[in-house]
Amino acid sequence: MRKSIVAGNWKMHGNLAANAALVTDLLNTRFPGDAVDILVCPPAVYIPQVAVLLQGGGIALGAQNASAFEKGAYTGDISLSMLAEFGVQYVILGHSERRALFGEDDAQVAEKFKAVMASGVKPIICIGETLDERNAGQTLDVTARQLKAVLDVVDTDSLSEAIVAYEPVWAIGTGLTATPEQAQEVHHALRELIASYDADAAAKVRILYGGSVTADSAAQLFAQPDIDGGLVGGASLKAKDFLAICSAAADASANG
């Protein structure tokens, strides 16, 4: 059985005081039986602060991006070894905002994915279609293309350690959320694609849903057989909302 996981993507939000208050609130809640893995991904500048706040608290630390390069003349980039020094265990790759606003294409995301896998940090690879692509009936083709770009460059034996996040672009920050049935259709197709490379890995890999996940929508989404938790944006900045989503994931994991 796959253990649920909920990742909080703080995006470009936070300050020293707000971060401390948020993490303190999160650490004051525990979930029975460790039924869910929880991690937070602050902006890079706050990773050292949050790393200290999280020590011994049972919540993991993630980053929002990483370089495919280990060192060199790459102004503004942050290497995986630098992140690892602060205890970063996960890194988000290929988020739609990185693709749309910063021009990251499938090949660049795949190179980052390969570097992350080689480093021992766990990648969270984001994929998803735009509203125009969904309306054109291209959802499964687009998401398969994005995932296949990654699957083609990594050792399939290590795929089970990766995390996939399906985030329909039209649902990110819009208040719109895919129905449980829409999300499950894509998650199932993604798992089938992974199975075509490695059936054992497909059974183990955790596939998250992201896109305006709320406490109200989480329970129905996480009850779907191929949805293993969530990548949460805005709601991860409010402890009460984020913890409610984590609780829904824990319930789904316990009842799965």
Image (cartoon, rainbow, N blue to C red):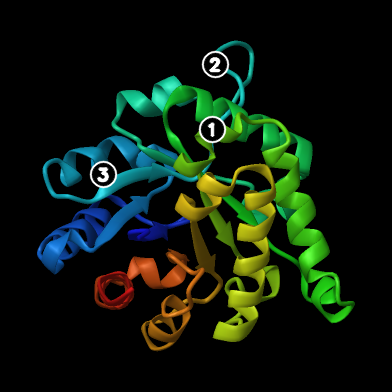
Q: Residue furthest right?
A: 136
Identify the residue at horizontal 51%, vertical 33% (top origin).
158
Q: Estimate the spatial distance between the alpha carbons at disc 2 and disc 3, rounded to whole Å.
A: 23 Å
Mark 1, residue position: 157
Seen from the viewer's position, the closer of residues 248 and 241 is: 248
Q: Amino acid at mark 3?
A: Val
Q: Amino acid at mark 1?
A: Asp
To which quarter of the image does residue 168 belong? bottom right
Mark 2, residue position: 70
Compare marks 1 and 3 and give the one earlier in the sequence.
Answer: 3
Vertical comparison of 81 with 245: above or below: above
Which of the two marks, 1 or 2, is nearer to us in this view?
1
Looking at the image, residue 10 sits to the left or right of residue 199; the answer is left
Mark 1 lies on a secondary structure that is: helix
Compare marks 2 and 3 and give the one earlier in the sequence.
Answer: 3
Identify the residue at horizontal 57%, vertical 73% (top origin).
173
Vertical comparison of 254 with 177: above or below: above
Q: Which mark is residue 50?
A: 3
Q: Quadrant of the C terminus?
A: bottom left
Q: Estimate the spatial distance between the alpha carbons at disc 1 and disc 3, rounded to whole Å.
A: 32 Å
Q: Estimate the spatial distance between the alpha carbons at disc 1 and disc 2, rounded to whole Å.
A: 23 Å
Q: Which mark is residue 21?
A: none
